[in-house]
Image (cartoon, rainbow, N blue to C red):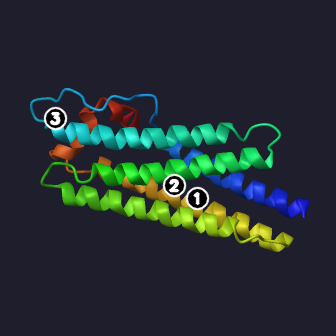
Amino acid sequence: MDSVRSAKLLAGAAVVTALALAASACGGSGGNNDTTTTTATTGNSATVAWASGVCNSFGAWKASLQRAKASLAGNLTSTQFMNAAHQAEVATQGLASSLQQLGRPPTQTSATVQQSIASLRTELQNGKKKIDDTLNGNPQSKAEVSSAVASVRTTALSMQSSFTSTVNDLKSLDPGDEVEKAFHQAVACQPFFT
């Protein structure tokens, strides 16, 4: 029973760690709380404010995952593990909620941007559900535990890929596009473009 419990803890730790690594691979910082910035003559301040909101949401998500990862150091107890897993879950739910609240950017190209963000939100929610289902499956045998760890790892990597793909989609908007300019002008987004 203790080996199954340890394996569950390791599987959960792998999820939190993979998500933290996914967030850190994309850059960004949760420490910048600027929500608006001065726009150049070609920018729209409402669009820059929206871009700042998106970047702040991703930065807060990343910071939460990093805190969860840091709490897994040392001799991990079941309570510490559950707290870290809960922190990662709440962070992902917060990201999804923040992106939903931001809605469409105030531009004519907003449908494309909104579709990318909606797809990411759905993929993150589906990944979270799959990880929850796997961790709640109560694997008993060594083979079941190995399978659960592999499933969690695959799901976490898929979530990382979805996040990276969405960031790249948003970064690759037409250079003349207002949303891309807003992302480059928003102070909160600067860490994502370095």
Q: Quadrant of the N terminus?
A: bottom right
Q: Is residue 178 above or below residue 124?
A: above
Image quadrant where residue 175 sits = top left
Answer left or right for 179 relative to 162: left
Q: Is residue 181 above or below residue 104?
A: above
Q: CA distance from mark 2 to mark 3?
A: 30 Å
Among the two numbered marks 3 and 1 on one chain, the one whose residue lies closer to the N terminus: 3
Q: Which residue is mark 3?
A: 45
Packing grade of label 2 (10 A; few <14, some 14-19, many >=20) is: many
Among the two numbered marks 2 and 3 on one chain, the one whose residue lies closer to the N terminus: 3
Q: Which residue is mark 2?
A: 160
Q: CA distance from mark 2 to mark 1?
A: 6 Å
> From where the camera sits, is residue 12 visible?
yes
Packing grade of label 1 (10 A; few <14, some 14-19, many >=20) is: many
Q: Position of residue 5 (x, y in %)?
A: 83, 59
- At 46% from the left edge and 39% from the top edge, which residue is drawn? 60
Q: Quadrant of the C terminus?
A: top left
Q: Which residue is mark 1?
A: 156
Q: Position of residue 24 (x, y in %)?
A: 53, 41
Q: CA distance from mark 3 to mark 1?
A: 35 Å
Q: Secondary structure at mark 3?
A: helix
Q: Decide: marks 2, 1 in contact (CB < 8 A)?
A: yes
Answer left or right for 144 relative to 97: right
Q: Position of residue 2 (x, y in %)?
A: 90, 59
Q: Amino acid at mark 2?
A: Gln
- At 34% from the left edge and 56% from the top edge, which residue is drawn? 117
Image quadrant where residue 157 sits = bottom right
- At 81% from the left edge and 59% from the top edge, which residue is drawn? 7
